[in-house]
Image (cartoon, rainbow, N blue to C red):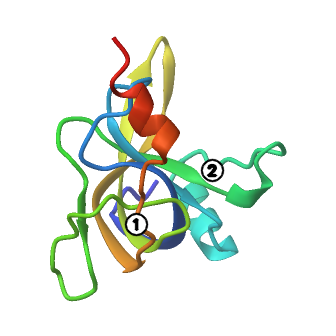
Amino acid sequence: MDLQPVKIQADVMWAFLDTPNQLSGKYQVDLCNLSSEAVAKLQGMGINVRKKEDQPEKGFFVTAKSFNYPIKAEDREGNPITAKVGNGSKAIGLIKPYPYEFQKKKGVGAGISKLIVTDLVIYEADATEEALDDVL
């Protein structure tokens, strides 16, 4: 099984690049609408590529995670992206597969070390979300 890093092109959804996801406690991003070549390569590494019938907009996708460090986002020239990366952004993710063992299950996870954003959609919280931030 080849566990070398691989670059995949994808649509970005649910990017928790500089703040850990509240459910998993990890930095993570869904890399969606993967090409058949990307799906074959990732599955060949042992990474579970998913497709949810109730979320057809995601197509085939993986949730790439970083356990201890924020996910570095940059543009094609290597300049850091400081804006929040929103759903629908296009990017190239540098996936670093890693073996894991959790609750007697073994597998290969999709780690991510870098996200090169090729088409940025800036995430902006709507007024409802901002109002909820001030709830006491």
Q: Position of residue 8 (x, y in %)?
A: 47, 71
Q: Where is residue 48 in the image (x, y as percent from the top left)?
A: 59, 45
> How many numbered marks are there?
2
Which label number is shown at residue 49? 2
Q: Which amino acid does label 1 sit on?
A: Ile
Q: Which amino acid does label 2 sit on?
A: Val
> Split into 4 quadrants, where in the image is the C terminus?
top left
Q: Which of 134 and 6 is in front in this view?
A: 134
What residue would you read off at disc 1? 122
Question: Is 114 situated above or below 98?
Answer: below
In the image, 107: left or right of 112? right
Decide if residue 42 is in sight here.
yes
Please tell me how crowded label 1 is: few (under 14), some (14-19), or many (20+) other residues with Cα within 10 Å: some
Q: What element carries label 1?
A: loop
Q: Which residue is drawn at 18% across and 36% down?
A: 68
Q: Nearer the viewer, residue 69 or 83?
A: 83
Residue furthest toward the bottom?
77
User: Of label 1 and label 2, which has the lower sequence position?
Assistant: 2
